[in-house]
Image: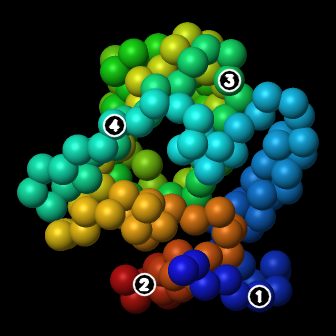
Amino acid sequence: MTKVIDIKAERLPAAAEFRLQVAELVQRILEHEGAKSGDQIAQEYEHTHEFAGDLYIRTVEVPAGELCVTKIHLEDHPFFIQRGRVTILTEDGPAEVEAPYRGITKAGCQRVGYVHEDVSWTTVHHVGDKRDVQDIEDSVTSMQPLDAELLEREILALGGLT
């Protein structure tokens, strides 16, 4: 279960402040017909789930023409785009990404993306001995911009305590 805390906006780390802005944008985007949230993506699109030792490997297939909003990622992890083309909005601005592509998702990242060509997107997570996919998803993502665990790590990092 995700813990959420209430904190004054002027005391937030910049990344958390950005997540609050994205949360407002996400609410407006999801009001548009056809926009998909992280939960809808998980339910509506084909996924494969694989395990290799302590690693969980998740691939999602998203068709062209979709406007998607991911959940907030709680940990750094690699991602790979094996097929397709997508424009994603991150705190660094919009970027068009085309397969083959690989990158690192940073903790706190939430993406808004428009899929131009069918996309095959894979993420890899260190999960120890967990094998329940829903439990894993709950431990590596959140829909709360002020997720307490993530915010605590960011505040500690500001003080050089990580």
Q: Earlier in the sequence, mark 4 or mark 3?
A: 4
Mark 3 touches mark 2? (CB < 8 Å)? no
* Residue matched to label 4: 48
86 relative to 94, above or below:
above
Q: Earlier in the sequence, mark 3 or mark 2?
A: 3
Three-letter code, disc 3: Glu
Q: Secondary structure at mark 2?
A: loop
Residue at position x 15%, y 61% in the image:
54
Three-letter code, disc 4: Thr
Q: Please give the label number shown on residue 66.
A: 3
Mark 3 is surrounded, within 10 Å at the Cα level, by few (under 14), some (14 to 19) or many (20 or more) other residues, namely some
Point out the frontmost of discs 3 and 2: 3
Point out the frontmost of discs 2 and 4: 4
Q: Secondary structure at mark 1?
A: loop
* Residue matched to label 1: 7
Q: Which of 11 and 126 lies nearest the eye of the viewer? A: 126
Q: Is residue 89 visible?
A: no
Looking at the picture, how far across and down is residue 48, in whole percent?
Answer: 33, 37
Q: In screen coordinates, is 144 left or right of 31?
A: left
Which residue in the rendered view is the most extreme toward the left? 53
Q: CA distance from mark 2 to mark 4?
A: 38 Å
Mark 1 is surrounded, within 10 Å at the Cα level, by few (under 14), some (14 to 19) or many (20 or more) other residues, namely few
Three-letter code, disc 2: Gly
Q: Earlier in the sequence, mark 2 or mark 4?
A: 4
* Residue matched to label 2: 160
